[in-house]
Amino acid sequence: MEVTVQELLNQLIEHAQADYEDERDLNFPPPKSSEMVHSVCGAFKLYLRLSLPLIPEDYAHQLLELTELDHHLEEIKMIIASLPPVLKNILTVFVGFLTEVVKKSHLNKMDGKNLSVIFSPSIFHSNDITIDMIKIHKEQEVIQVFLRHFEVIFGESAVSLTMEEEK
């Protein structure tokens, strides 16, 4: 019995939503084909778009208020450290993964700017339908700073967290 990509994606989405609602960690089976990789990526994207953003509005507001972000790394670090543990851990591993993607930008053309454009809407959810371009640009800047200063902002534990994922 062959499972279609759509059926697999639906199963993964249901699994992700059930884990989210029950506050469990996501546990996907290892990919068996490139189609499954795309399905897992689609499910992960939907997971990021669930009702609670990785950076909730009050934390996002604090980050977006800062000017010259590269000069406020300690403040950014404190804001990230104060996130609920589940969100902080997901954000840490996700940004750690994106820093690895940036390291290969000469091959994949995905530098910090490109990744910030793609992922800032998933990391920052806005309840405001009329979100302005200045806020969008600022959210992208925050993601770029996360990528440039990953070890400083997310700390030594972040490096060990992402290293464990590689094993």
Image (cartoon, rainbow, N blue to C red):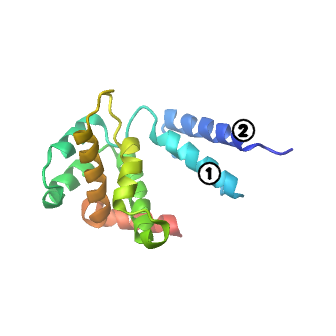
Residues at circles 1 and 2 in contact by the CB criterion of under 8 Å: no
Indicate the quadrant containing the N terminus: top left, top right, bottom left or bottom right.
Answer: top right
Secondary structure under badge 1? helix
- The earlier-in-sequence mark between 1 and 2 is 2
Question: In the visual, does 81 lie left or right of 107?
Answer: left
Q: What type is the residue that disc 1 sits on?
A: His
Q: Residue at x 29, y 57 (%)?
A: 144
Residue 154's image quarter?
bottom left
Residue where numbered disc 1 is placed: 38
| Residue 10, image x, y percentages | 66, 37
Residue where numbered disc 2 is placed: 7
Secondary structure under badge 2? helix
Question: In the visual, does 36 lie left or right of 60?
Answer: right
Q: Residues within 10 Å of mark 1 (few under 14, many from 20)?
A: some
Question: CA gap, disc 1 to disc 2?
Answer: 13 Å
| Residue 138, image x, y percentages | 23, 46
Q: Residue at x 20, y 53 (%)?
A: 76
Question: In the visual, does 29 lie left or right of 82?
Answer: right
Residue 31's image quarter?
bottom right
